[in-house]
Amino acid sequence: MASTQENNSATTQTSRQPMKKILAISALILMTVCSLSKDVCAQSLFVWGNVKWATGNPAIGIEVRLLQNNGMVKSTAYTDQTGSYAFFGIEGRPADYDVVAYSRGRVLGQTRVPAISPGGQVPEITLTRRTLRVNVVAAPETVAVGQKTVITVTVRDENGQPVPNATATISAGGGKFLGPGESYDPQSRLHGPYSATGNTDTRGIYTTSWVCNPCAPGYGLRVEGTKDGYIISAADLTIAIK
């Protein structure tokens, strides 16, 4: 699971001050340089900002991308213990860029960089507290060589409500994931593909089947659930071989 847990606000409030002082000093130096040399300033802009949860606590370890208006990624940073990030050495006007917060490639929040001065603070990005909860079961959990097991993934939100159209990805270190309705010969070699991906239905459920031949004594399967606007969630499943 992505490590995007909220920290205690009292602790982070204290630790936020050094970062802000560093950025403030850098901004002062840069504005002084800009007043003396427009050429240097044009190649030395930096902007910074904060990402927080709806509770007000800093969002830690969030991937933040600086995107040009054409959608190209100019730079990537990660928020620190105070939820702060900074982009240095950008070219052109800050207003030519967007700042987008991600978790494992999924968009969590976005803001347009305003016409700020060099070293200016970008409007704070507030992330809606939406979390996926993944549950996975296999029937049966213990199989013989060449015997199929049906894997059911259920994705819910933090309130226990089903999440439709979430992407579920299941991976294993061996065996074979079967496609919908796919037949197979239990006596044949059954290895690969080693992962399966699909979307949950209106009940928040995705199912697939897995089989192996030859088999190890057991397999650990990893399941991840993702959806735009949600923090990624994961779960593990062990399948034993008779």
Image (cartoon, helix red, strand yellow):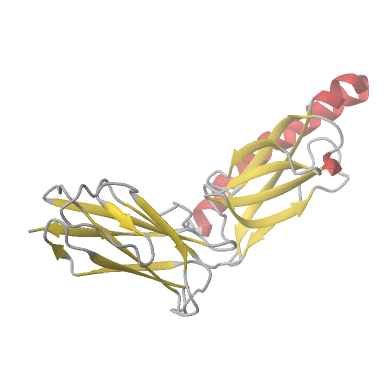
Image position, residue 71 (x, y; %): 75, 44
Which residue is at a point 33% across and 48% down the rendered structure image? Answer: 194
Residue 79 picture quarter: top right
Q: Nearer the viewer, residue 189 or 48?
A: 189
Q: How many marks?
A: 0
Image position, residue 2 (x, y; %): 45, 52
Whether residue 18 is visible: no
Q: Nearer the viewer, residue 223 or 84?
A: 223
Image quarter where the C terminus lies is bottom left
Whether residue 111 is visible: yes
* In the displayed structure image, the side of residue 100 where residue 10 appears, left or right: left
Which residue is at a point 29% across and 62% down the rendered structure image? Answer: 183
| Image position of 71 with respect to 165: above or below | above
Residue 115 picture quarter: top right
* In the displayed structure image, the side of residue 205 where residue 119 appears, left or right: right
Q: Nearer the viewer, residue 32 or 219?
A: 219
Image position, residue 1 (x, y; %): 40, 54
* In the displayed structure image, the side of residue 167 where residue 77 appears, left or right: right
Which residue is at a point 61% across and 66% down the rendered structure image? Answer: 128
Q: Nearer the viewer, residue 227 or 96?
A: 227
Image position, residue 220 (x, y; %): 23, 53
| Image position of 44 with respect to 171: above or below | above
